[in-house]
Image (tube, rainbow, N blue to C red):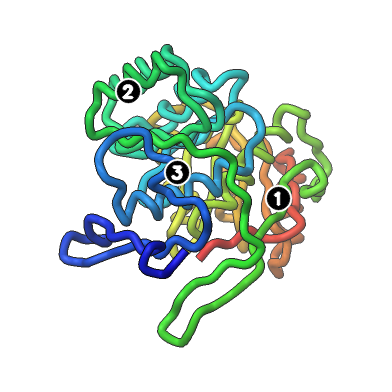
Amino acid sequence: MSIKNRRKKLRYGENPNQNAYIDENNKLSIFDFQISGKKISYNNIIDLDSGLRCLSEFNEPTSIIMKHTNPCGVASDKNIYKAFNKSYESDTKSSFGGIIFLNRKVEIKLSKKIIKNFFEMVVAPDFENKALEVLKTKKNLILLKIPNLKKEKVICKPTLFGDLYQTNDLTIINKNFIRLASKKKSSPKLIDDLLFALKVAKHLKSNAVVLAKNKQTLGLGHGQTNRVDALKSAIKNRNVYFKNKLFVCASDGFFPFTDSIGLLNRYGCKAIAQPKGSINDNKIINYAKKNRISLYFIKNRLFKH
């Protein structure tokens, strides 16, 4: 395929005053996946990349509502209809105009639920014909049928000083990824919630904090320049939608001081997963022991700049 044929012009870039195109680097074209809706934009492609990377962490039925490359809500459940409802209920305000990512076929019951609210795009591995009929009543709603895509081994980021390359973070988050640091062990259900929260945290901008329960995000804090503010942002969302729910917490980096873990304890956190490496690790461990919080250290940090 020639460079000319690989290069596709887009409506505009991040803003209308910017020109943009995509230089497709493989045999698959994003435009081949589109079923209906308006033309895919520059921002849509960036969000697609972020959402699909996050979705690839999950094997069970999972729904992610993404906006500006960060999740508004993430949830897993026994079926995709329940997972979507939980992801939407995680933050109904932020989900407005977002992109829905699903890892199961969209059935008619779910399609009727989706069109009750405004979304930019629905991405799934497949759609029932009747579900497509319902979704296509929203003429501008972009529908994409995308299979599981293979992750690249090396990723590149252009800078003013040259292109940066690094190996992709293909860390598999499972029970072997965490190690108990305090005395109190969590129940298997809470450990599942911790692993779920870590999978989400891996795809948030640092500093990232995830509050979760029953494989549903209750509060997300990300992109803050300090971890306390990220935590406060997550707790604020939790207090709006899930005020009295107990929860677990996953952090992409260590909590350097006991102020954060003290705040978590105050609002009902039962288990925490974070990397070790702070000079105050022992203080954090002792606080967790004293307040009967299950503290787990993870194998490596999950920073995303």
Residue 256 horizontal/vertical position (percent): 62, 63
- On screen, residue 150 versus residue 12, left or right, reads right
- Pointer 1 residue: 287
Q: Which mark is residue 135?
A: 2
Residue 65 horizontal/vertical position (percent): 42, 37
Q: Which mark is residue 71?
A: 3
**Observer-nearest residue: 175 or 128?**
128
Query: Which dot, 1 or 3, sits closer to the camera?
Result: 3
Q: Earlier in the sequence, mark 2 or mark 3?
A: 3
58 w.r.t. 109: above or below: below
The mark total stands at 3
Which element is circle 3 on?
strand
Badge 2 crowding class, 10 Å Cα cut-off, few under 14, some 14 to 19, many 20 or more, is many
Q: Residue at x 46, y 35 (%)?
A: 145
Q: Residue at x 48, y 84 (%)?
A: 162
Residue 184 horizontal/vertical position (percent): 80, 38
Q: Amino acid at mark 2?
A: Leu
